[in-house]
Image (spheres, rainbow, N blue to C red):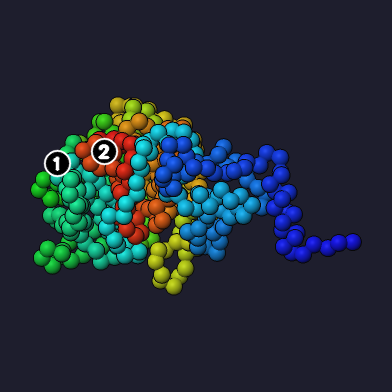
Amino acid sequence: MAFLTGVGVLSVILGQALAEPGVISPLARACPGYSNNSDVVCINHYASAMPPTFDRPHSSGGVFFPNDTFVGTQIPSDPSWQLVKNATFVVFDERGSQILGPSPKLEHIFASRNDSIHEGPVYVPSLDAIIFSLPHQGIYEQQIIHLNHGSTPRLDNYTTTPPVYAVNGGKLFNGKVYWAVEAGFSFLSPQNGSLVAQRPGIYELDPSTGEVTVLLNNYFGQAFNSPNDLWIDAQGDIWFTDSWYGYAINVTEYPVLRPATYRFRPSTGRVSIVEDSIAQPNGIGMSPDGRTMYISDTGVTDFENYPANGTLPRYTYNPLGGNSLYAFDVLPSPAGSYITSKRPIYLAQTFGDDGFHVAQNGYLLGAEGGGVTVLSAYGEVLLRIEAGFTINNIQFAGPERKDLWLFGEGPISRVTWDLVGMANE
């Protein structure tokens, strides 16, 4: 009787895997029209039937593993998978190729420390600039990228009057910038050293003067947890998510309100809760026709079992927590719109969708782990941009809103393609 060595057994197993009925081979191929661009790869049939020997690393022990991704899957029996590991643009649907255009490109524009998070980017057409935040302990100013189209972009510090601590989300509406602000501690002004008192809330910035106005900082006398992101509808009502991440990075006190999503009407001061079933509501946006609201859940962050040794952030990773993107119907009423018919339309393929935007054609973009996922309005995965670093937020910019800027833990980068952003995104 013959015995097989370990290598021989593996060869037999791999051979059986290749012969497995229904297994897709090859799983990946060079996309048509991109023969000279190894950065673009097409996935065959969504790789729905892999060889049974596939193995994707999974996060455990309360820690998220950066290689816990689709492209991090190990498939030794299919050489085509190496194309995926080397690609920047991973196409799942032909609509993904259409939005890439003929010459997609990812460029790292500004270097940054890997432990520095960038959040809340907003493109201001009147300045041709992107204003963004570094929501960290002890950083009391924002930064601005002067795009200088036709020449090299320039990065400067940006301080408002009064200064604002820890902006996490922002949107442009009627020429003003609206911020979701996390921090709830007093701090020393970077302008003159005076003490600035601040609570979490919704703030308005006039980019022409740099002046800031506090619009909302309490719910009937109770401080909000840490507003995370916001959207402004056609009536001027501000919808915002209020999660626990300000406490996670120690810029505000322990939360006393459950995570929730609110609608705020600046003209009257009235604030109403509209959703409170999502574990940690995060990114938020609305369809171009105003009929569908989208809210992402990053409930994979566990605030109940975080280490008590003082390390930040104050949460652990729970892979069984919520990380779906939800769609809701928007129902008008005399008091302002409400949302109903909650339904999950996408389960994040890695971690969860943090920053979230809606393109002009209704496609959905989520800053998700080490890249950006592009979905149809119904949650179909069309394209994945693998950036090589953690992405926390994204922003369309430029005169035609066709440049997508990536912000997160690492460099500040830019994607050049054919997808166009909405004017108030």
- Relative image position of residue 94 (x, y in whole percent): 46, 33
CA gap, disc 1 to disc 2? 14 Å
- Please say if the residues under marks 1 and 2 sit with CB atoms less than 8 Å apart: no
Is 286 or 303 nearer to us in this picture? 286
In the shown orientation, is residue 422 left or right of residue 298?
Answer: left
Seen at 29% across and 39% down, the residue is 402
Q: Position of residue 17 (x, y in %)?
A: 70, 48
Q: Closer to the camera: disc 1 or disc 2?
A: 2
Q: Position of residue 421 (x, y in %)?
A: 30, 37
How packed mark 1 is, by other alpha carbons closer than 10 Å (few <14, some 14-19, many 20 or more), is few
Q: Say what secondary structure mark 1 lies in.
A: loop
Q: Which residue is mark 1?
A: 126
Which amino acid type corresponds to the residue marked 2 in the rendered image?
Answer: Arg
Residue that carries the numbered disc 2 in the rendered image: 401
Image quarter of the C terminus: top left
Please tell me the numbered disc located at residue 346.
none
Residue positioned 50% across, 58% down in the render: 67
